[in-house]
Image (cartoon, grey):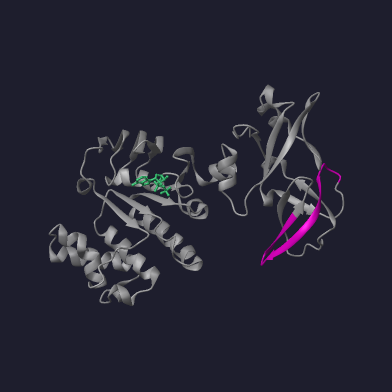
Amino acid sequence: MASVTIRNVWKYYGETPAVKNLNITCPDGSFVSILGPSGCGKSSTMRMIAGLEHISAGDIHFDSQRINDLAPKDRDVAMVFENYALYPHKSVYENIANPLRLRKASDATIKDRVNGAAKLLEIAHLLDRRPHELSGGQKQRVAIGRAIVREPKLFLFDEPIAHLDAKLRAHMRGEIKHLQRTLGTTMIYVTHDQLEALSMADYIAVMHDGELQQWGTPSEIFNHPVNAWVAGFVGEPAMNFLTCDIVARGEEVALRHSNFDIPLLAGQARQLNGSAKGGTARMGVRPDAMAISMEKPAEPSITGNIFVNELLGGDMLVDVSLADCRVRVKTAPEFSGKPGETCYLTVNRSKWHVFDAKDGHAYF
Ligand code: ADP
């Protein structure tokens, strides 16, 4: 086990930076997810940690050891990729045993560790099979087994379940999290899937365009995004954004839009800087932080027009047209409003966000 510290790390391919001044510290034994869309620099970061890519600038430490110049084989890191890279002609047992055979471990050690890993991964009954006799999920378990038997300091998982079907992915999320907890080994897990990161990780590093946007627990990232980009990337269905004017009326500060005029809570008004007042901002609100009704409520609300209803089993998503955009609200499946009818949205103001109109940073 080891902590991993990434300090001022840059990765250039030619003139183009793929990772820009990255700083993160993964505590010993933690499950850290590097989350971001394709091309944001996740794999480059992972490959620098593994020693598969040169670090253009900056340092990486495992505990107090600087590993920049350490050969990959000396880093004691086990990687699992989306493509399992199993040997097709070898049995499951031999595939898992392979790293130990390369290290010339004794037969007794190999047997012990392979059987232990197979039991943990519930593939003990598959040890005699060849990879072509396995399902996608089973192959992925074999690839994970091969990483476990090495008893490394650090696991690096790069989109390991991205290609599995949705049901199996949901199952494997729980399995991998449980596995990491059981083994207690530090894990860095790369994914573009915000749900994977939110559901599995202790800490998430959100990356965009080579830059770290936010580091935090899943709850911090979801509930307190530092900017509109993180807010829009994390959460499904996505956060709604509305461009509003910020108007100050004596003590009160309100968000004004063609479809509403709603005051901020007192504490929130104090979080806006002076220059924001009187300007425009982007208000962000998640679909489950609003309530929809067909009667005009007493409290300030957003007036809109129902565009379409989508019944999603236990929830209903309602798309509501406003003057310049459409917003989505999550409600109960019994909701009876029909497309074309006027409706009213009440915002849970302790859960809304205001972002700077220019650079997108969050005031709250
Ligand atoms: P991600 O894993 O988030 O999809 P990558 O780290 O693979 O992102 O890539 C980040 C950026 O670096 C992308 O713009 C990608 O095209 C570029 N890149 C990655 N690998 C190479 C390479 N070997 N040569 C040149 N550019 C690369």
Give x and y (percent) for residue 190. Answer: 41, 50
Q: Is residue 223 at all visible to an observer of this figure?
A: yes
Vertical position of residue 128 compared to residue 47: above or below: below
Q: Which residues are magenta?
A: 298-319
The image shows a total of numbered marks equal to 0
Give x and y (percent) for residue 191. Answer: 44, 52
Give x and y (percent) for residue 211. Answer: 45, 37
Name the residue rendered at 81%, 41% in the picture. 260
Quarter that holds the C terminus: top right
Name of the residue lying farthest toward the front: 15
Residue 10 is left or right of residue 289, and the answer is: left
Q: Is residue 302 magenta?
A: yes
Q: Is residue 352 at all visible to an observer of this figure?
A: no
Give x and y (percent) for residue 159. Answer: 41, 56
Q: Is residue 80 magenta?
A: no
Residue 191 is left or right of residue 315, and the answer is: left
Task: Return the residue nearer the eye: 213 or 321.
Answer: 321
Look at the magenta stretch and give its main secondary structure: strand
Name the residue rendered at 25%, 60% in the picture. 149
Q: Quadrant of residue 145?
A: bottom left
Q: Quadrant of residue 269?
A: top right
